[in-house]
Amino acid sequence: MKELTITTIIRECDFEELPASDKRLVELAKEMTRNAYAPYSRFHVGAAIELADGRVVTGANQENAASPSGTCAERSACFQAGAIAPGVPFRKIAIAAWTELRKPEGLDYEEYFQDSPISPCGACRQALLEYETLGRGPVEVILYGRRRCYIFPSIASLLPYCFTEF
Ligand code: THU
């Protein structure tokens, strides 16, 4: 039996080190956290997808009393992109989040955000992967945290040995 090793090169940096266009994408993801409808989890997530034609499509998590009926920010953005820009490849996605539960009174909006980034859930990885496959090119994933950002080279890198077809 042989062993196989999966290697992913993830870049870690401070927000200030990001190129200006990535900073803008992150700012849009952060801005979208204001549009989260999260009365149940109190966890606000925003996502912004940069398309190959330069357009940016955004999303925010939308919850529901019948919990499985809600959706994450990433799927909100990617289904929106699929609906309004069908066939246009995705190039990048930025994600930002904060929780009402650990937000002491008096904090500035900037300080709400998680110190360390959150990473998309399995269902969002699978959904995004399909658009990455359709677009025939990697979709860079920029995860924002106040103390550090992570940059993954593709959706597939977040979902090794993924299911893509039947
Ligand atoms: N959520 C997202 O929107 N994106 C993620 O990557 C993780 C979780 C949402 C789903 C739910 O509304 C809330 O955060 C708590 O899980």
Image (cartoon, rainbow, N blue to C red):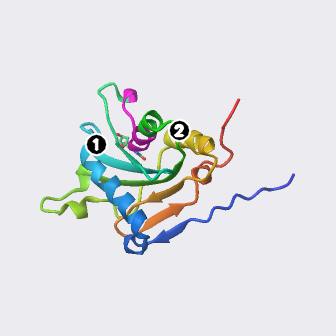
The kind of residue on which mark 1 rests is Ala
Name the foreground residue: 62 vs 82.
82
Whether the residue carrying mark 1 lies under 8 Å from ligand 1 is answered with: yes
Q: Quadrant of ligand 1?
A: top left
Q: List x then y, in percent, for residue 138.
A: 60, 53
Q: Which mark is residue 138?
A: none
Residue 11 against residue 41 in the figure, above or below: below
Question: Is residue 114 located in the magenta-colored stretch of the structure?
Answer: no
> Which disc number belongs to residue 127?
2
Residue 127 position, x and y percent, is: 53, 38
Q: Quadrant of residue 134?
A: top right
Q: Residue at x 30, y 59 (%)?
A: 113
Q: Position of residue 135 (x, y in %)?
A: 59, 45
Disc 1 packing (10 Å; few <14; some 14–19; many ≥20): many
Residue at the extreme front of the image, as rendered: 53
Q: Secondary structure at mark 1?
A: loop
Residue at the image position 35 percent from the left and 64 percent from the top: 115
Q: Quadrant of residue 105 in the image?
A: bottom left
- The segment highlighted magenta reads 68-78
Tell me if mark 2 has few (under 14), some (14-19) or many (20+) residues whose alpha carbon lies within 10 angstroms of its own.
Answer: some
Gap between marks 2 and 1 measured at Cα: 19 Å
Amino acid type of the residue that numbered disc 2 sits on in the rendered structure: Ala
**Element type where label 2 sits in the image:** helix
Above or below: residue 93 compared with residue 88: below
Q: Nearer the viewer, residue 75 or 87?
A: 87
Sequence order check: which comes first, mark 2 or mark 1?
Answer: 1
**Label 1 belongs to which residue?**
36
